[in-house]
Amino acid sequence: MKTSLVIMAAGIGSRFGGGIKQLEPVGPKGEIIMDYSIYDARKAGFDKIVFIIRKDIEDEFRDIIGRRIEGQGIEVEYAYQELDNVPENYKGRWQRKKPWGTAHAILTAKDKIKEPFAVINADDYYGKEAFSKLHDYLANTMKNNADRLDICMAGFKLVNTLSDNGGVTRGICEVKEGYLSDIKETYDIKLENKKISAKDFDGNKREVSIDAYVSLNMWGLPPAFLDILDEDFDKFLSNLAGDDIKTEYILPAVIDDLIKSQKAKVRVLETSDKWFGVTYKEDKPLVVNAIKELIAKGVYE
């Protein structure tokens, strides 16, 4: 079965200082994190790549990675996430600079995706195990249920996904009998004195177990999910206050609503790989060293 990898690379990168963090070289030959994700995905069996980018970074993106991947014999598509990618009746209603969020990003690629697909962030390193498990589920296990969407998610241990240089945002998961039962987007998660500190959307302190499973926006989804996003985004916009320029349309919230309404079930595919990524400028040397260690172990050439 054909499977696609959808890479969300339209983020502004504000915590990284305004630069295009997804395009920062971290490998010995100038490789970026996406190079390793695409390599692992192709080894796992994915045979199509869909890049979600912004128009203003298109030339640099194609120069640094796009054309190179296009020349490797794999199908490549582009989708563009922009603030004005909203239905006509909503255009101009909000004067916002903040992106509409990860669920909106996937929605902008709706016309490019006709097959089961995995979703990842461009600036996260996930590891080989997660790509293999997602591909196998998409190709061999995912069922076409008319009454309930069959979704999968790579489940990472929270302790394996933290940054030494500041707080991170994660979808904190509750898992029952191998399936996701609850997910809450949680902010400013830090490890301090062997304890986790975290906040909810409103900035209130939230308790989180260090052993919790988290989502890193690595999902396996059926094409029918895109139709649900299309319909749900209109509802999201209609309920948004006229002065709200902050709230985002995000994948964890959409999927959590589908679980709660029993419209979807989400299989959690546990992975022991350690995440790393360039959230802050100070993270880059750590990522460079992590890649060097993986090359020394023979994981990459």
Image (cartoon, rainbow, N blue to C red):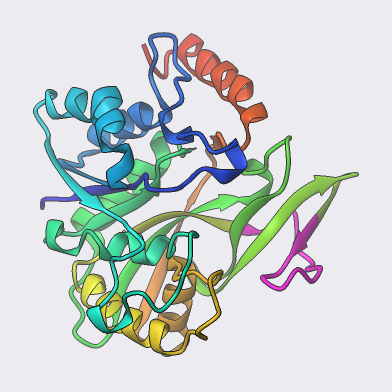
Question: Can the viewer see residue 53 in this picture?
Answer: no
Asked if the magenta segment contains residue 222, the reply would be no
User: Looking at the rendering, which quadrant does residue 137 occupy?
Assistant: bottom left
Q: Quadrant of the C terminus?
A: top left
Q: What's the residue at 44%, 48% (across, down)?
A: 11
Indicate left or right for 256 with 185 as reference.
left
User: Looking at the rendering, which quadrant does residue 171 occupy?
Assistant: bottom right
Indicate left or right for 140 with 7 as reference.
left
User: Is 219 or 228 nearer to us in this picture?
Assistant: 228
Instruction: Tell me where residue 56 appears, x and y as whole percent.
Output: 32, 42
User: Is 17 or 95 nearer to us in this picture?
Assistant: 95
Instruction: Tell me where residue 20 appears, x and y as whole percent.
Output: 45, 34
293, above or below 62, in the image: above
Instruction: Tell me where residue 142 appears, x and y as whole percent.
Output: 24, 65
Q: What's the residue at 34%, 79% (across, down)?
A: 233
Which range is magenta? 197-213
Indicate left or right for 6 with 296 as reference.
left
User: Is 61 or 169 nearer to us in this picture?
Assistant: 61
248, above or below 165, in the image: below
Instruction: Tell me where residue 191 appears, x and y as whole percent.
Output: 79, 46
Q: Main secondary structure of the magenta part?
A: loop
Q: Report the residue that reaches farthest toward the right.
A: 193
Q: What's the residue at 44%, 59% (across, down)?
A: 99
Indicate left or right for 237 with 52 as reference.
right
Q: How many marks?
A: 0
Asked if the magenta segment contains residue 212, the reply would be yes
User: Looking at the rendering, which quadrant does residue 44 occupy?
Assistant: top left
Question: Can the viewer see residue 291 in this picture?
Answer: yes
Q: What's the residue at 30%, 61% (across, down)?
A: 106
